[in-house]
Amino acid sequence: MSRLPEIAHPHRKPYPSDLSDAEWEVLRPLLPASKGFGHPVTVDFREILNAIFYVQRSGCQWEMLPHDLPHPSTVYRYFSRWQRRGLWQQMHDQVRGQLRQRSGRAIEPTAAIADSQSVKTTEKRGRCTASMVASRLKGVVGTSS
């Protein structure tokens, strides 16, 4: 069964991909603030994030968003704008840092792990394939003369 988020006063039936109140409190300060000029922001950023997470979790197309979420073109416009500005990476880095700090670790990791197995496999496969192709070419050349 899917978990439904804990939302104090939902205005619609929640989806399993929706942000809980606790998750929203973590992400809200990381979203861009209004500039104070121009056209005022009239969309609910929580609902925009809920719609983006719905697409990400369900794998549906933008146009197939449920009707009780914001319009697909609005959701996609915010998603792509935030992607271009690097907001998703900033949010990820800040939340990761907060979680690491809460668990008593350094904000930035001090070690990295590299998987060299895939490189070794690729090298073996490359040599094996090259020798198989060469032996087949020898056989073709030897029979045609």
Image (cartoon, helix red, strand yellow):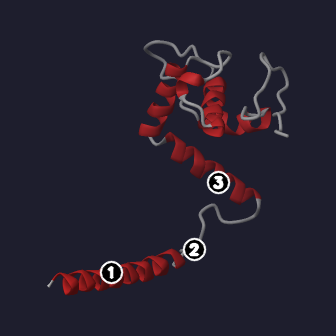
Residue 110, position as x, y percentages in the image: 59, 72
Quarter assignment of residue 126? bottom left
Residue at image x 82%, y 39%?
2
Which residue lies under the disc numbered 1? Answer: 130
Q: Position of residue 135 (x, y in %)?
A: 30, 86
Amino acid type indicated by mark 2: Ile
Q: Position of residue 85 (x, y in %)?
A: 43, 38
Determine the CA span between mark 3 and mark 2. Answer: 17 Å
The residue type indicated by label 3 comes to Arg
Residue shown at 57% from the left, 13% from the top: 42
Where's residue 73, x and y in %? 49, 20
* Residue designated by label 2: 113
- If the image is split into quadrants, where does the N terminus sit? top right
Residue drawn at x 63%, y 61% is: 107
In the foreground, 34 or 126: 126
In screen coordinates, is 28 left or right of 32? right
- Dot 3 or dot 2: first in sequence order is 3
> Which residue bears the numbered disc 3?
96
Q: Earlier in the sequence, mark 1 or mark 2?
A: 2
**Residue type marked 1:** Ala
Which quadrant holds residue 15? top right
